[in-house]
Image (cartoon, rainbow, N blue to C red):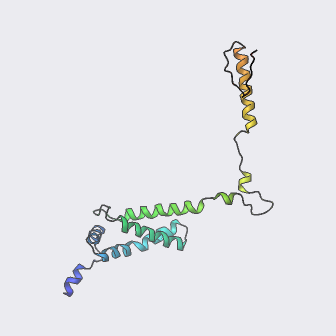
Amino acid sequence: MEIQERTRTPRPGMTDSVLAQRYLAGDQQAFEVLVNRYSGPLFTFIRRFLGGEYDAACDILQQVMLQLYISLPKLRTGEPLKAWLYQVARNRCLDELRRKRAIHFSELEKGTDEEEQSLLDTMQDLSPLPEEVVERRDVQDLSLVGFFGNGGGAPKRSIGVETDFCC
């Protein structure tokens, strides 16, 4: 009986595909072997990618292993899992870095000192003012009237005032 138990227990030397197939067949220890096989190297990769942040690396490693647990039935088990795991870890790290780098609108309004301007104040608004838009339109209309003359070729625009007489 003891000999049979040994042969059923997954060995660390088994390939990823054999371990994945055993896990899919119901062997939870096979998944543990996969986790133990990749946790150390993945953690090192994630921590270096994040610049040494221990807590964030632990969280991302846990997310990667959870993604493996969820996705293993859908993955092609005949291929090694290493490339897939590192790709998932890389994507999670990039997401984390983007999340940390994001500037929230409320932070744009804050200045650190009274002398310093807030980031929102230093940003230039390049869109024209409403008065400038109207002035440009008037200049265009005048140039079109000058080009077409008073012969009616220029497009006419109403400014919202209705009159009963015509000139």
Q: Is residue 160 left or right of residue 21?
A: right
Q: In which quadrant of the rendered image does the N terminus lie?
A: bottom left
**Residue displayed at 31% across by 76% down:** 28
Q: Work out whether residue 47 or residue 56 is closer to the camera in this orientation and state it.
A: 56
Q: Work out whether residue 85 or residue 125 is closer to the camera in this orientation and state it.
A: 125
Residue found at the far front of this picture: 164
Report the number of discs: 0
Residue 91: x %, y % from top left? 47, 60
Residue 33: x %, y % from top left? 33, 75
Q: Is residue 7 above or below residue 158?
A: below
**Residue displayed at 38% across by 76% down:** 36
Any part of residue 87 in sight: yes
**Residue displayed at 46% across by 62% down:** 90
**Residue displayed at 43% across by 74% down:** 40
Residue found at the far right of this picture: 115
Residue 51: x %, y % from top left? 55, 67
Q: Is residue 145 above or below residue 5?
A: above
The image quadrant that residue 108 belongs to is bottom right
The image quadrant that residue 86 belongs to is bottom left
Q: Work out whether residue 167 or residue 147 is closer to the camera in this orientation and state it.
A: 167
Residue found at the far bottom of this picture: 2
Any part of residue 12 in sight: no
Q: Work out whether residue 54 or residue 163 is closer to the camera in this orientation and state it.
A: 163
Q: Is residue 159 left or right of residue 32?
A: right
Residue 145: x %, y % from top left? 72, 18
Q: In which quadrant of the rendered image does the C terminus lie?
A: top right
The image quadrant that residue 3 belongs to is bottom left
